[in-house]
Each structure stands twice: as structure tokens, then as C-alpha cells.
Amino acid sequence: MFQILEKKMLNDAVCMVKLAAPLIAKKVQPGQFIIFRLDEFGERVPLTVADYEPEKGTITLIFQLAGESTRAFAALKAGDAILDLVGPLGMPTEIPEETQSVCVIGGGVGCAIAYPQAKHLHQMGLQVDTIVGFRNKDIVILEEEFRTCSDNLYLCTDDGSYGTKGFVTNVLQQQLENGKKYDLVIAIGPVPMMKFVCKTTEPYGIKTLVSLNPIMVDGTGMCGGCRVTVGGKVKYACVDGPDFDGHQVDFDELMRRNTTYREEEHDCRLHGKGNH
Ligand code: NAD
Ligand code: FES
């Protein structure tokens, strides 16, 4: 069992949970994920680790209340425990050796994963700009955390209720047009956002890493659920990723595959047997 040490709602639909998981905390690196199962009937849900403290033996998860399992997880409180936590899974993010300046881009809940990347790169002594985007002011998360690890933080909202009005891609385009140079862009958020960030950086020849979130089942490369096409080749996000060269990713296929079980999620046949 893995005990919840702290739980906080960051906004109405996004929850932060800190868990005691000393072995995972000791090994995990930025970009890697875990799979949790709340109880013996629970589905397996993959989540990228948002933060970790090896010396205290804790990991932090930040997730959107997207289905029954995440809603049930968010209903737990400090002192409760969950049954399974498997990880760290996937490959850590690989930063090219020559990298000096990076732009980390987070969209909505994707900021939960963009933040540890920015923090790690900042600790490595790199120049880190961050661009974070949200639909509106009410759902902004991790602003202060990003500020502490960014040389420049650009915050935008779709409706202009806070920061610059527009998408993260508008801010990025503006930066690049103004002559800003980045060796690397890391984009994490909704699939259309990652697709359009890649379209924005491509003409400038800036290497762009994206963290893919396909449907996962086992998380160990066996079921094929997380199949993605990268550079015309089949890859499995759980073992080959989740980070990939965004200019090589078939985003349209990923968007199609991600909607496969939408109906089942809303009309689950296992309802009532556990946290589905
Ligand atoms: P959202 O739809 O509110 O978008 C967040 C921001 O992304 C927007 O404010 C905008 O700046 C940018 N954006 C969105 N669509 C864009 C487009 N077409 N072009 C350019 N920029 C765009 O995001 P949300 O609802 O908070 O996020 C939920 C999504 O993020 C889910 O689909 C979830 O699966 C995904 N997510 C992905 C990861 C990952 O590892 N890649 C992690 C967490 C969440
Ligand atoms: Fe099964 Fe990746 S989740 S192969």
C-alpha cells in the first residue's frame, strides 16, 4: 500500500497528491511515469511524475479529474492509501549535450509535467524560458513554481483573463519572430497544442520534444495499446517514450487513437464493482 501524505485541489478539476513511495522517489527521473491502481478492482492509470524528493521518499502526482478512477483518487485524503504504484516507467527525457537555452511549454494540465522539466533544466544551469497557457484565469496552476525556475515566464490565457491573450503557440511565434534563439523546445499538453508547437518550431529548425499520452494498459511494451507512429516507424510510448521528437510524430493518428474508448469511459460496464 502507498500512503497519501498530502492532497490538494489546484483548481476545480486538477488534483495534487503527494505519496510515500521511497523506492520510486530514489530512481525516478524527469519524463518518467508511474501506473496506479486504487484497489483490486481499479483500472491501471498512467501518470507522469510531477515532482519527487528522493531524500524524503515522496513523489507528487498532478492529474485532471478525467474519469471515474481519477475522481475516486481525488476523493481520498491524507492518511488514506492506494493499492498499487508501479514505476518509474518509460525513458527519462534526453537533453542533447550541446543544449544551452530551452523553452519549456505547458498547456493546461500538461503544466504538471512541464514544471519538473523546467525545474530540472534550471538546476542543470541552462537558460530556461517557460510559456504556460490556460483557458482562463480560474484554472491557472503552478504559476509561482514556474516563476522560481524560469529566466522568463510567459503566461497566457485563451480568453485574455490573465497574462497575454492567446494560445502558447502565439507567444512562441512572437518570441521566434523577435529573434529569440532556443536550442530546444519541450512541449507538454493537449495533442493539438503539441502538434502546433511543432509546426511553429519546424521552420526555425529547433529540436522539439513532446511527451505523448496515448492510451496505456500494461506500461511495459506488451499490449500495444500505446502504439504511436514516429518517423514512419511504430513506437510504444511506454517503453520507447513517452518523449519523442515532435517533428517526427503522427499527431493525427494519435488524436484518432486517443478517442477510441471515449464511449466506454462514459458508460462503463464494470460500474459499481470498484473505482471505474
Ligand atoms: P486545454 O485544452 O485547456 O489547453 C491548454 C492550453 O494549450 C491552451 O490554453 C492553449 O494555450 C494550448 N492549446 C490548446 N489547444 C491548442 C491548439 N490547437 N493550438 C495551440 N495551442 C493550443 O488543456 P487541458 O484541458 O488543461 O489539458 C487537457 C489535455 O492535456 C488532455 O487531453 C490531457 O490528456 C493532456 N495532457 C497531456 C499530458 C502529456 O503528457 N502530454 C499531460 C497532462 C495532460
Ligand atoms: Fe502496453 Fe505500452 S501500454 S505496450
Image (cartoon, helix red, strand yellow):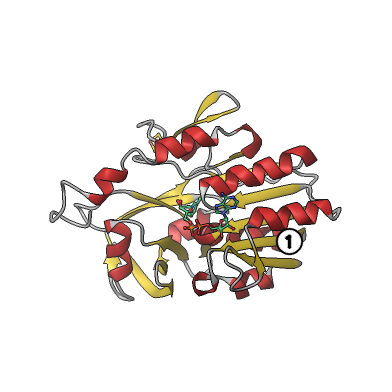
Q: Is residue 100 visible to the viewer in this orientation of the structure?
A: no
Residue 171: x and y in percent read 71, 58
How many numbered markers are drawn?
A: 1
| Front-lying residue, 23 or 33 | 33
Q: Quadrant of the N terminus?
A: bottom left
Question: Mark 1: is the Cβ under 8 angstroms from ligand 1?
Answer: no
Q: Residue furthest right?
A: 179
Q: Secondary structure at mark 1?
A: strand
Residue 169: x and y in percent read 66, 53
Quadrant in the rendering for residue 80:
bottom left
Query: Is residue 259 left or right of 162 when viewed as pictured?
Result: left
| Front-lying residue, 140 or 245 | 140
Q: Residue furthest front?
A: 159
Q: Residue furthest left?
A: 272
The residue lying at 35 percent from left, 32 percent from top is 223
Residue 39: x and y in percent read 22, 57
Identify residue type, mark 1.
Asp
| Front-lying residue, 194 or 161 | 161
Residue 139: x and y in percent read 49, 70
The residue lying at 38 percent from left, 30 percent from top is 224
Residue at image mark 1: 129
Query: Is residue 122 left or right of 52 when viewed as pictured?
Result: right
Q: Is residue 253 visible to the viewer in this orientation of the structure?
A: yes
| Front-lying residue, 166 or 239 | 166
The residue lying at 55 percent from left, 61 percent from top is 111
Mark 1 surroundings: few (<14), some (14-19) or many (≥20) residues within 10 A: many
Query: Is residue 270 left or right of 96 when viewed as pictured?
Result: left
Query: Is residue 54 left or right of 177 when viewed as pictured?
Result: left
The residue lying at 22 percent from left, 57 percent from top is 275
